Image (cartoon, helix red, strand yellow):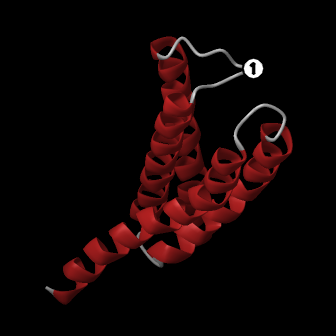
Amino acid sequence: MPNWLRSALSVLIGFVVFYTLQGACTMAAARLFDRNFDQPTNGYLVVALAYTLLAALAGGYVAARIAHSAPVAHGVGLAILMLPLMILNVKKGFGGQETWFVVVRSFATPAFAIAGAVLDAARHRKLLSR
């Protein structure tokens, strides 16, 4: 497989991992917290923030792991791919969610995708040093 195709697929697969985990956790948390979509509780928002950031971390790690080279660059690629989603979340989030939640989620999610790639970069460096 050509390197450019592997790179593109790694970022897309990382996004699918992020979006799938985040969506599944959202559905589970909504049931668990019996969430009212008009007035989410602070407990729900904290849990939603936690699973969103963990999903971004996993997506970044997967993107970097699949890419095989330049792991952090692939995490940055995933973060860039997330930006339109985060902008949409900011736009619609201020309508019914706490401001702190919207701001933190929108800025921290891409950063966690990069952090996931950094985790793989550390693993990658260890493998290269052997």
Counting other residues with Cα less than 10 Å from the Cα at mark 1, is it few (<14), some (14-19), or many (20 or more)? few
Residue 78 horizontal/vertical position (percent)? 61, 60
Residue 91 horizontal/vertical position (percent)? 86, 45
Residue at 49%, 75% (x, y): give it.
72
Residue at 66%, 50% (x, y): give it.
100
Q: Is 32 placed above or below 110 here?
A: above
Q: Is residue 116 left or right of residue 106?
A: left
Q: Is 129 placed above or below 42 here?
A: below
- Can residue 1 be seen in the rendering of this structure? no
Secondary structure of the residue carrying numbered label 1:
loop
The residue under label 1 is 38
Residue 130 horizontal/vertical position (percent)? 13, 85
Residue at 70%, 64% (x, y): give it.
80
- Can residue 66 be seen in the rendering of this structure? yes
Q: Is 49 placed above or below 125 here?
A: above
Residue 101 horizontal/vertical position (percent)? 64, 46
Q: Is residue 36 left or right of residue 75?
A: right
Q: Nearer the viewer, residue 76 or 1?
A: 76
Q: How many marks?
A: 1
Q: Is residue 95 left or right of residue 76?
A: right
Residue extending farthest left: 130
Q: Is residue 128 left or right of residue 68?
A: left
The amino acid beneath tag 1 is Asp
